[in-house]
C-alpha cells in the first residue's frame, strides 16, 4: 500500500464505476470497490471489493475506512422508463446512500469526495424544444428537475455544498449527460437509449421493424465511458467545488441515433413509434463552456466510433446468449 492514494469507488459493480476502477488501477492507485452487487460482465480490478448495501449507515462507515478519496457513484438508477416509474423508491434509496456516504466520509477524514449528479437536475421548462439551448450549470435553478431521481440528485448536490460550507469538507459535483459504452446494462429495464437501441437492432432481422419510444424527434447528447472516466479524474484533481457538466455537445435525435446504429449493424429496419411510452424531456444538450475552462479538456470520442464499439460488444453478448436475430418487437420495450 505504501504512499499510494487510497481510493473508494462506490457503484463499482455498475457501469461507470467498473470502468473507473480499471482506470484508477492502471494509474497505480490502491482501489476499494463497493456495491450491493458484483460486476456483471467481468471481474473487478479493485484491490478490495466489498459487497455492501450503502443505504445502511454502518456499511458506509466500513466502506470509507482508511480512504483518501471517494467517488460516490452508487445509485438506484436506470433509463427513462425506470426513473419515471419508481419515484418513491429511487428517491428514498438514493437519499439514504448519499446522506450516509457524505457523513461517513467526513467522520473517517476522507480528503476529497466526488458526487455523481445528473443532467436530470436541469429545469424541465428549459428542455421543452428538440432544438434546446445547451444547458449551462446555472440552468438548474429555479429548481424544476425530473421528479424523483432529479430532485434527489439536486438536493444531494446541495448537501455537498452544505458540507463544505459548515465543515470545509472538500466536495466535487459532476453532472453527467448520458453515458454509454461496453459493459453497460443493455436489457432488463434499467438500460439507457444507446444500449436499448443497440440491443433491439442486434436482435432484429435485416428488413424487420424496430420499436422506438415516442416520435424519435427528442434530442440528447451522449458521452463515451472512457471520456467520462477521464473527466471524473480531472474534476477530482481540480479545485472546482460547484457543479460541472460532463458530457458532449454533439446533439442527436433518437431517430438519428437509430439510423447510426442501423448503419453500423448494416441493417435496414422500419421504425415503429410507440407514443404511449415515456420519452423524457423533449431536448437536452450540454453547454461545455465551463467544462473546458475548468478541466482544460472535453470529451472527444466521436459518437459514431463509440457506438460502433458499444454495438459490437452488445451484439457479441447477445450471440453468447443466442438471442440475435429474433424480431425486435419481442424485446418488449
Ligand atoms: N449512465 C448515465 O448515463 C448516467 C447519467 C447521469 C448520472 N449518472 C449517475 O452516475 C452514477 C453511475 O451510474 P451508472 O451508469 O454506472 O449506473 P449503474 O446502475 O450501472 O451503477 C450504479 C451502481 O450502484 C449500485 N447500487 C445501487 N444501490 C446500491 C446500494 N444500496 N448500495 C450499494 N450499491 C448500490 C448498483 O448496484 C449499481 O451497480 C449514478 O450515480 C448515476 O445516477 C449516470
Image (cartoon, rainbow, N blue to C red):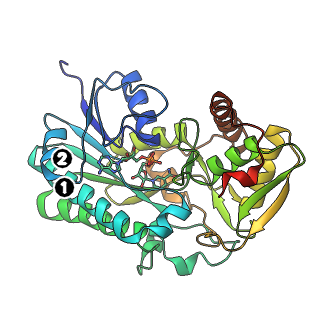
Q: Quick one: 244 or 194, which is closer to the camera?
A: 194
Q: How many marks?
A: 2
Instruction: Count residues near mark 1 (Cα–Cα under 10 Å), then give few for <14, some for 14-19, many for 20+.
Output: many
Q: Which quadrant is the N terminus positioned in?
A: top left
Figure check: 137 above or below 256: below
> x, y percentage for residue 128?
62, 78
Is 269 displayed left or right of 47 in the figure? Answer: right
Q: Quick one: 268 or 319, which is closer to the camera?
A: 319
Quadrant in the picture for residue 263: top right
Figure check: 332 above or below 311: below
**Residue at position x 37%, y 34% in the image:** 38
Quadrant in the picture for residue 198: top right
Q: Quick one: 276 or 166, which is closer to the camera?
A: 276
Q: Quick one: 158 or 195, which is closer to the camera?
A: 195
Q: Which numbered disc, 1 or 2, marks the residue that appears first in the sequence?
A: 2
> x, y percentage for residue 31?
29, 29
Figure check: 2 above or below 317: above
Determine whether the residue tagged by mark 1 lies in a helix, strand or loop: helix
**Residue at position x 19%, y 43% in the image:** 111
Check whether the beta carbons of the residues at disc 1 and disc 2 lie within 8 A of each other.
Answer: yes
- Single out the residue that lies furthest toward the top: 2
Is 122 displayed left or right of 195 in the figure? Answer: left
**Residue at position x 74%, y 55% in the image:** 329
The label on residue 60 is 2
> x, y percentage for residue 144?
44, 79
Determine whether the residue tagged by mark 2 lies in a helix, strand or loop: helix
Q: Which residue is mark 1?
A: 100
Amino acid at each position: 500500500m505504501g504512499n499510494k492514494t487510497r481510493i473508494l469507488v462506490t457503484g463499482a459493480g455498475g457501469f461507470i464505476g467498473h470502468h473507473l476502477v480499471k482506470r484508477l488501477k492502471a494509474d497505480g492507485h490502491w482501489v476499494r470497490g463497493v456495491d450491493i452487487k458484483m460486476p456483471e460482465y467481468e471481474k473487478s480490478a479493485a484491490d478490495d471489493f466489498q459487497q455492501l448495501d450503502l443505504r445502511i449507515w454502518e456499511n458506509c462507515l466500513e466502506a470509507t475506512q482508511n480512504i483518501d478519496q471517494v467517488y460516490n457513484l452508487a445509485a438506484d438508477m436506470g433509463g427513462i422508463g425506470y426513473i419515471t416509474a419508481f419515484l418513491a423508491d429511487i428517491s428514498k434509496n438514493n437519499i439514504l446512500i448519499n446522506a450516509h456516504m457524505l457523513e461517513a466520509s467526513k467522520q473517517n477524514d476522507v480528503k476529497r469526495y466526488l458526487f455523481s449528479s445528473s443532467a436530470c437536475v436541469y429545469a424541465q421548462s428549459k428542455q421543452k424544444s428538440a432544438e434546446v439551448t445547451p444547458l449551462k450549470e446555472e440552468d438548474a435553478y429555479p429548481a424544476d428537475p425530473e421528479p424523483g431521481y432529479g430532485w434527489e440528485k439536486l438536493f444531494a448536490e446541495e448537501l455537498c455544498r452544505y458540507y463544505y460550507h459548515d465543515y470545509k469538507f472538500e466536495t466535487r459535483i459532476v453532472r453527467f449527460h448520458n453515458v454509454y459504452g461496453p459493459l453497460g446494462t443493455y436489457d432488463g429495464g434499467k438500460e439507457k437509449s444507446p444500449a436499448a437501441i443497440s440491443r433491439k437492432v442486434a436482435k432484429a432481422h435485416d428488413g424487420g421493424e424496430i420499436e422506438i419510444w415516442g416520435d424519435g424527434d427528442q434530442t440528447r447528447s451522449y458521452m463515451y465511458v472512457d471520456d467520462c472516466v477521464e473527466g471524473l479524474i480531472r474534476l477530482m484533481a481540480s479545485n472546482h467545488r460547484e457543479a460541472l457538466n460532463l458530457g458532449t455537445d454533439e446533439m442527436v435525435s433518437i431517430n438519428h441515433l437509430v439510423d447510426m446504429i442501423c448503419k453500423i449493424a448494416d441493417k435496414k429496419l422500419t421504425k415503429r413509434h410507440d407514443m404511449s411510452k415515456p420519452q423524457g424531456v423533449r431536448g437536452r444538450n450540454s453547454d461545455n463552456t465551463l467544462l473546458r475552462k475548468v478541466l482544460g479538456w472535453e470529451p472527444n470520442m466521436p459518437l459514431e466510433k463509440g457506438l460502433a464499439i458499444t454495438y459490437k460488444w452488445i451484439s457479441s453478448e447477445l450471440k453468447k446468449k443466442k438471442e440475435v436475430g429474433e424480431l425486435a418487437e419481442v424485446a418488449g420495450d
